[in-house]
Amino acid sequence: MSIRCLNQRKFQPFLNRQKEISEVKWVDGVFDRLSNGQKETHELTLLKNCRIWQLKPESDILMRFISYDQMKKDFGEPNPKDYQVVYDGEGKQQFGSDLFQV
């Protein structure tokens, strides 16, 4: 049994309870990178179309879930060193705002 199958089995009951999630696409390597705390992604084969960056776990908690304007006011311009790639793959989205529609 592969690690991927174990991860899917572990999280599938949780995902089934999430009413706002209509589809889950399991992508090899994403869970392993995130769970191992991998920070550098330059050795990965990057795919085209969609790349999602997220604040790193060690970033200031007050930076999360605030508007861009508030972030600039409180912390200055975003620093790329505070972010990590959490998804890099193909997507059906035409516009960045489509990524956040459930």
Image (cartoon, grey):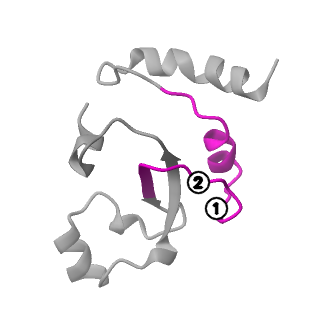
Q: Give coordinates of residue 10: x percent, y percent.
A: 63, 21
Secondary structure category for the residue under label 1: loop
Query: Quick check: marks 1 and 2 in contact, CB under 8 Å?
Result: yes
At label 2, which amino acid type do we have? Leu
Asked if the magenta segment contains residue 72, the reply would be no
Q: Give coordinates of residue 45: x percent, y percent.
A: 65, 53
At label 1, which amino acid type do we have? Thr
Which corner quadrant of the image does residue 77 belong to?
bottom left
Q: Which residue is mark 1?
A: 41
- Quadrant of the frame with the C terminus: top left
Q: Nearer the viewer, mark 1 or mark 2?
A: 2
Q: Which residues are magenta?
A: 25-53
Asked if the magenta segment contains residue 34, the reply would be yes
Q: Is residue 17 left or right of residue 70?
A: right
Q: Give coordinates of residue 87: x percent, y percent.
A: 50, 48
Q: Which residue is mark 2?
A: 46
